[in-house]
Amino acid sequence: MDYLGIKQPKKSKYNNKKVIVDGIKFDSKKEAEYYCQLKLLKQAGEIKDIGLQQRFVLQPGFEKNGVKYQPITYIADFVITNNDGTTEVVDVKPSKTFKTQVYRIKKKMFEYKYPELTIKEVY
């Protein structure tokens, strides 16, 4: 709310606290901690690369009857390239049971569109 012209900080939809590590803003402390683990693995030479917030198109945008529809996308928390060239797509979740309906649908669409990849959920 806005009292006397003072804006209150916007509350997170899922009560997560944004965290900044290496100048990168993460949606949760758990996500930032996972990034730190990945960074150590990369420095040790155990993984080749770390991608952040990579977007995957699940359904392209289109126009029908003069109405424009936006593409449906899934944004992975991390995309890890292993030394052997394989790729891991990682989604950090607060708990095993916390999966929104939108996430479940997008995951199913992702698994269909990208059969060579699998979303690894980290809790």
Image: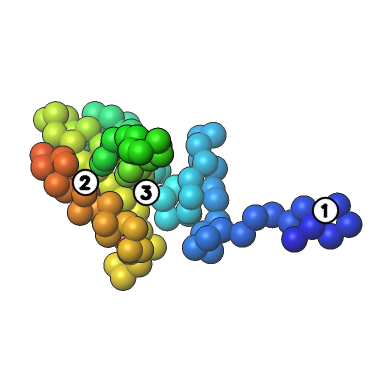
Label 3 SS: helix
CA–CA distance in space, label 2 to label 1 = 42 Å
The residue type indicated by label 1 comes to Ile
Q: What amino acid does circle 2 point to?
A: Phe
Q: Which mark is residue 6?
A: 1
Q: Quadrant of residue 101?
A: bottom left
Where 100 falls versus 75 (above or below)? below
- Image coords of residue 24 (percent x, y): 50, 37
Q: Position of 107 compared to 13: left or right?
A: left
Q: Pick whichever, 92 or 106, lies toward us.
A: 106
Rendered-image quadrant of the C terminus: bottom left
Local crowd at mark 1 within 10 Å, few (<14), some, or many (≥20)? few
Whether residue 33 is situated above or below residue 39 in the rendered picture: below
For residue 110, the mark is 2
User: In x, y percent, where is residue 7?
Assistant: 77, 53
- Of tags 2 and 3, the one toward the viewer is 2
How much space separates mark 3 and mark 1, taking CA atoms? 35 Å
Find the distance from the CA under tag 2 to the CA under tag 3: 22 Å
Q: Nearer the viewer, residue 106 or 92?
A: 106
Question: Considering only order in the chain, which callout, 3 or 2, is on the residue closer to the N terminus?
Answer: 3
> Helix, strand or loop at disc 2?
helix
Residue at the image position 14 percent from the left and 29 percent from the top: 85
Mark 3 highlights which residue?
34
| Picture residue at 21% right of the left edge, 46% below the top | 110
Q: Earlier in the sequence, mark 2 or mark 1?
A: 1
Query: In the image, what residue type sits under mark 3?
Result: Tyr
